[in-house]
Image (spheres, helix red, strand yellow):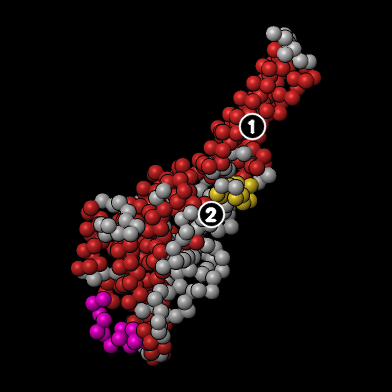
Amino acid sequence: MESHTPTPDGGTRERLPNLFEVLSRRTLAPVDLFSFYIYMRDVQRSVDYLDFWLDVSQHMSLCRHYVRELRRSVLISTPDLEKGGSKRSSQILDNYTAERHSSDQGPSATARDLSGMNKERMSNDQRLSAFLRGDVDSKHSPQHSMASQKSEGNTPGSEHPPRPSFNTGTPEQPPRPSFMTGNTGTPNTGTPSPLNHSNSNNSPQHTVARADIRASAEKILYTYLLPGAEREIILPQGILSGITAAIEREGRDDPEVFDAAKDYVFQAMERDAFPGFLRAKALGNIVPPSMLLRLILGLVSLFTGFWTAFVLIFLGKSRATRCWVIWPFTFGVYFLASHQYLLDPVLALAGYSEYTFMSVHRIKEAFVRKLLTKRALMCLCWIVIIDVALCCLFIFVPGKRL
């Protein structure tokens, strides 16, 4: 949107967030990643694209975890590296694990003009991918064999490592269950499990073997990219061919394999889905089923008000009796204005927003709360003006019995 430079942790954002900040979990309800997941699932019907982007980011985290464990195992296996004059191997591995807390799992830099921080992150990611590519070619080196045997010896019956949180400025959270690990969400429930923020004890506490990285890359390929895949997403043929060749023929599994696809999906979500998400969540606080219900109730209430008003007028009823039309007119105007503005003004002033139909949560993003309060007051002003006009017209007009 406005900028891809994230707001520093702890800072106050006096603007709407961009997609990168949402995917990095740097925003609060109702413009958080959980809300965006529900929007992609229920409104856009293209949650597979978001799951692909998140799983590729998790693959990057898996690779970083592997490099950290490899470095630790090398230092344990060869303690003389720290004592002797030669620290070459330790320094090489250190380069790939440096500044991991400042590295974001956002869009890769192949299609963007990045700031200094993102350029540094990209340099680290490129070195990580280069190390993993070189690791394939050096599997028979004594040093790698020692580390690999130690790593694999600590992973009996394991499949996948912990999947760190996207928020790189905070301690790592439990892994995000996803289709890759077999814990799929339930599409028709109000709370999708792929983004469950609860503390889970299912995080495997073991080191990462190289086979885990390979399995992760193949799972992404077979789940999202191959023709006829269970959750196939549509990508340009050139990107698909490049990824398939890199994984199946060249044996690669480093994160750079998915860079082009990740950029393409990010830009597609930013262009096609994210503006609608901000319009629905930052400028409104009700979901489409609720909007439809309000439209129906508003039309019925308004019809009832007009019908009652004309009946009372042509029966020659007094103005005091005709004051009963205030209720249907008020409800009708309120529901129709809520549908038109995409928000419930009373709910917005109370500080709540709908996640799913009839499920509300408190608004925590300060700038969004301010926007919704202004729009709610404006909506209430129009409701009062239109309601007063209708009531005065049908109450004070002279009655005549037919």
Going 37% across and 49% down the picture, which residue do you hit? 267
Any mark on residue 25, and which?
none
Rendered location of residue 380, percent (x, y): 66, 32
Which residue range is magenta in the image? 136-150
Report the predominant secondary structure element of the magenta stretch.
helix
Going by the image, does 30 lie left or right of 124?
A: right
Could you say whether the residue bearing mark 1 is in a helix, strand or loop?
helix
Which residue does the numbered mark 1 point to in the structure image?
A: 334
Measure the alpha-carbon separation of dots 1 and 2. 27 Å
Q: Quadrant of the N terminus?
A: top left
Q: What residue is pinned by disc 2?
A: 190
Q: What kind of residue is marked 2?
A: Gly
The amino acid type, in three-letter code, at marker 1 is Tyr
| Position of 153 relative to 56 (above/below) | below
Q: Is residue 341 left or right of residue 88?
A: right
Q: Residue 192: x, y in percent? A: 50, 58
* Between 64 and 318, the one nearer to me in the picture: 318
- Rendering quarter of residue 82: bottom left
Q: Earlier in the sequence, mark 1 or mark 2?
A: 2
